[in-house]
Image (cartoon, rainbow, N blue to C red):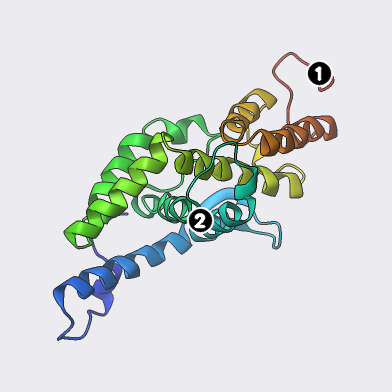
Amino acid sequence: MEDDAQIIDRNPLPEGIGERLAAQLTFIAEADRLKTILRASPLAAADRRENDAEHSWHLALMVLLLSEYADESFDVGHAIKLVVVHDLVEIYAGDSPVFDPAAVVDQRAREEAAADRLFALLPEDQAREIRELWDEFESGATPESRFGRAMDRLEPMLLNWLAEGGTWQMPGATVETVRAREAGVVAASTSLGAVTDAFITEGLRHGWIRPAPGREPGD
């Protein structure tokens, strides 16, 4: 973003709203920006790219529906909190397509700065809670974060499969870099990892994924 103006500044809240609620509504209004952050992944239902808000909702639905395939037990409600929060920082940091090497060079620094700025809009206790959720998702150190991160890998793979390529057609994508993304699914679910393996194997056979340099699709 080019300036520090917040969405709420366009039409300030009415007088008389308590300080805590005003801060929460300010954050919620700012979160509306997530609907404008386009990802590289295509939608399956329309000829356009998905946005971050759609992506986060889709992950929450996947956590709810696919939790039975996790290799370790976890708190579904907590995992849903993680995936709802995980991309909020992209409001200020922007999306960083994984198959674009230039886009991910300073990704961590941009997202840390965005987290500091965005979560500070909330009351102190909620700012701390949301930051802890974001940090937990990024760490991948809990069963909930591992499954949430697995859904974050599986969802674009499903969309790419349905699009007969999608982001697999980006210049930086080869079967090796796509396989690297698959590892995040395998880490949380053997069953779902088998599905992503089938996506990649068949995607390579169909020519939707490029083979590793110097190799043919069947090698």
Q: Looking at the rendering, in which quadrant would you find the N terminus?
A: bottom left
Pointer 2: residues within 10 angstroms few (<14), some, or many (20+)?
many
Q: Nearer the viewer, residue 76 or 99?
A: 76
Quadrant of residue 186 in the image? Answer: top right
Question: First in sequence: mark 1 or mark 2?
Answer: 2
CA distance separating discs 1 and 2? 36 Å
| In the rendered image, the vertical position of residue 87 relative to residue 16, given as above or below | above
Graded by Cα atoms within 10 Å as few (under 14), some (14 to 19) or many (20 or more), the crowding at tag 1 reads few
**Visible in this render: residue 163?**
no
> Mark number for residue 183?
none
Which one is in front in this view, the residue at disc 1 or the one at disc 2? Answer: 2
In this rendering, the answer to whether 111 lies above or below 194 is below
Residue, far front: 73
Residue receiving disc 1? 216
Q: Residue at x 50, y 53 (%)?
A: 76
At x 75%, y 37%, the residue is: 199
Dot 1 and dot 2 residues touching (CB under 8 Å): no
Disc 1 marks a residue whose amino acid type is: Glu
**Secondary structure of residue under mark 1:** loop
Residue 56 disc label: 2
Label 2: element kind: helix
